[in-house]
Amino acid sequence: MTATQLAAKGAKVIVFESYLIPGGSAGYFQSQGYTFDVGASMIFGMGNKGTTKQTLFSEINFYGKS
């Protein structure tokens, strides 16, 4: 998210991912034969004050509005 905000302000950024799957807090874990997604609430939210996805899309003008 920080890289997106910096790039939106004109900075040149390079993002390095140390894990084999990009996404930061996105991921999963398995327990007792079940697979649980983790991190999705960070992106898609669970409240009525907006989501990280909406903030990012707004920052990079994803919707094409000024």
Image (cartoon, grey):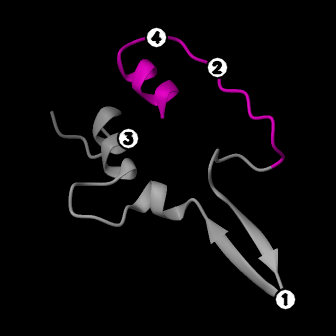
Q: Residue at x 40, y 26 (%)?
A: 5
- The alpha-carbon separation of the residues under discs 2 and 1 comes to 38 Å
Q: Quadrant of residue 15?
A: top right
Q: Nearer the viewer, residue 59 or 29?
A: 29
Quadrant location of the C terminus in the rendered image:
top left
Disc 1 target residue:
33
Q: Residue at x 64, y 20 (%)?
A: 14
Relative vertical location of residue 25 with respect to residue 64 in this rendering, above or below: below
Q: Position of residue 1 (x, y in %)?
A: 48, 35
Q: Please report whichever mark, 1 or 3, sits nearer to the chain's N-terminal start.
A: 1
Disc 1 on helix, strand or loop? loop
Residue 14, disc? 2
Q: Position of residue 4 (x, y in %)?
A: 46, 29
> Where on the picture, by quarter, is residue 57?
top left
Q: Counting residues from the N terminus, which is met first, the one under dot 1 or under dot 4?
A: 4
Residue 39 horizontal side relative to residue 61, left or right: right
Q: Residue 8 magenta-drawn?
A: yes
Judging by the rendered image, the residue that carries numbered circle 3 is: 56
Tell whether 31 sits left or right of 36.
right
Which class describes the residues within 10 Å of circle 2: few (<14), some (14-19), or many (20+)?
few
- Circle 4 — which element? loop
